[in-house]
Image (tube, grey):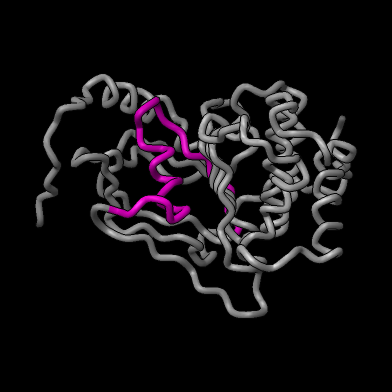
């Protein structure tokens, strides 16, 4: 079923002004697994309201970076500075959409109940959902073309339907920062196009979107900003600049030289 969105109301992604305040600022960020860094000494910022693709080869540290931004991975060096919003601003919550491979779809949960988890930060483990919150969940299902699937077990959904369901859950989180790990992996072109429409709507609402992607043409067409990562930043800025051949070549060369048994890196202090 198609998304219930008016495409004409959605503007083309805007170019984020450089003067925009940072939603997230990285200071010498290093992330590691068992003493081996996955991301080395990363410095930079994601402007508030920006829409950034994180790209790079397998093993480049893209998912690790999202885990850290989501608060699910503690830095082994450096820090992440998060913008503090005032009470009148967009909510400060961060929404994280993981790869489908990270989710156990055999768990017996209904589609509506999974979407309702988007209210978790407001409800906690003890409060029941209100009628208004349930209606919001139904509206989110309708927005992603899944109204009528409320009583379906998540194991009964196709890959594309389940991805729509995860997007509906993100809608309920009403977050200022939205993190998406390979959101279009293994889904058909039609579903991808429709979910991109939803991303553009969020972008138009001044939310900060950071997505791990592999499709370079998708990045060129839909994401104004990009971070090219090969365990360290190769390029970070306007997508057209980041995707220049010399940057992509350097990324491939660095990936070919990776030593998975290398010792902990020590950054020289000037």
Residue 246, quarter of the rendered image: top left
- Residue drawn at the location 39% of the way across and 26% of the way down: 57
Residue 89 showing in the rendered view: yes
Task: Report x, y in % for residue 223.
Answer: 60, 40
146 relative to 139, above or below: above
Residue 50 falls inside the magenta stretch: yes
- Residue drawn at the location 54% of the way across and 47% of the way down: 210
Residue 166 versus residue 256: which sits nearer the camera? 166
The quarter of the image holding the C terminus is bottom left
Magenta segment boundaries in residue numbering: 49-75
Task: Report x, y in % for residue 53.
Answer: 53, 40
Residue 95 versus residue 269: which sits nearer the camera? 95
Residue 189 versus residue 105: which sits nearer the camera? 105
Task: Report x, y in % for residue 258.
Answer: 22, 25
**Residue reaching furthest to the bottom:** 87
Residue 6, quarter of the rendered image: top right
58 relative to 52, above or below: above
- Residue drawn at the location 73% of the way across and 46% of the way down: 168
Lateral position of residue 132 relative to residue 43, left or right: right
The quarter of the image holding the N terminus is top right
Lateral position of residue 5 relative to residue 207, left or right: right
188 relative to 93, above or below: above
């Amino acid at each position: 079923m198609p998304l219930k969105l008016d495409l004409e109301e959605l503007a083309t992604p805007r170019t984020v002004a450089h003067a925009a305040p940072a939603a997230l600022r990285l200071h010498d960020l290093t992330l590691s697994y068992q003493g081996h860094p996955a991301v080395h000494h990363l410095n930079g910022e994601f402007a508030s309201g920006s829409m950034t693709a994180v790209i790079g080869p397998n093993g480049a540290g893209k998912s690790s970076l999202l885990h850290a931004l989501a608060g699910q991975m503690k830095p082994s060096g450096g820090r992440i500075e998060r913008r503090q919003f005032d009470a009148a601003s967009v909510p400060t919550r961060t929404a994280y959409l993981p790869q489908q491979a990270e989710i156990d779809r055999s768990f017996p949960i209904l589609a509506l109940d999974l979407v309702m988890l988007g209210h978790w930060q407001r409800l906690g483990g003890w409060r029941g959902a209100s009628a208004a919150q349930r209606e919001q969940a139904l509206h989110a299902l309708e927005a992603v073309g899944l109204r009528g699937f409320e009583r379906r077990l998540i194991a009964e959904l196709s890959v594309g339907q389940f991805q729509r369901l995860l997007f509906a859950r993100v809608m309920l989180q009403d977050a200022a920062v939205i993190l998406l790990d390979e959101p279009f992996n293994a889904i058909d072109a039609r579903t991808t196009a429709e979910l991109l429409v939803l991303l553009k709507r969020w972008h138009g609402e001044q939310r900060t979107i950071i997505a791990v992607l592999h499709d370079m043409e998708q990045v060129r067409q839909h994401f104004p900003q990009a971070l090219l990562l090969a365990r360290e930043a190769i390029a970070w800025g306007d997508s057209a600049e980041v995707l220049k051949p010399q940057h992509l070549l350097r990324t491939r060369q660095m990936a070919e030289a990776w030593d998975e048994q290398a010792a902990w890196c020590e950054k020289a202090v000037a």
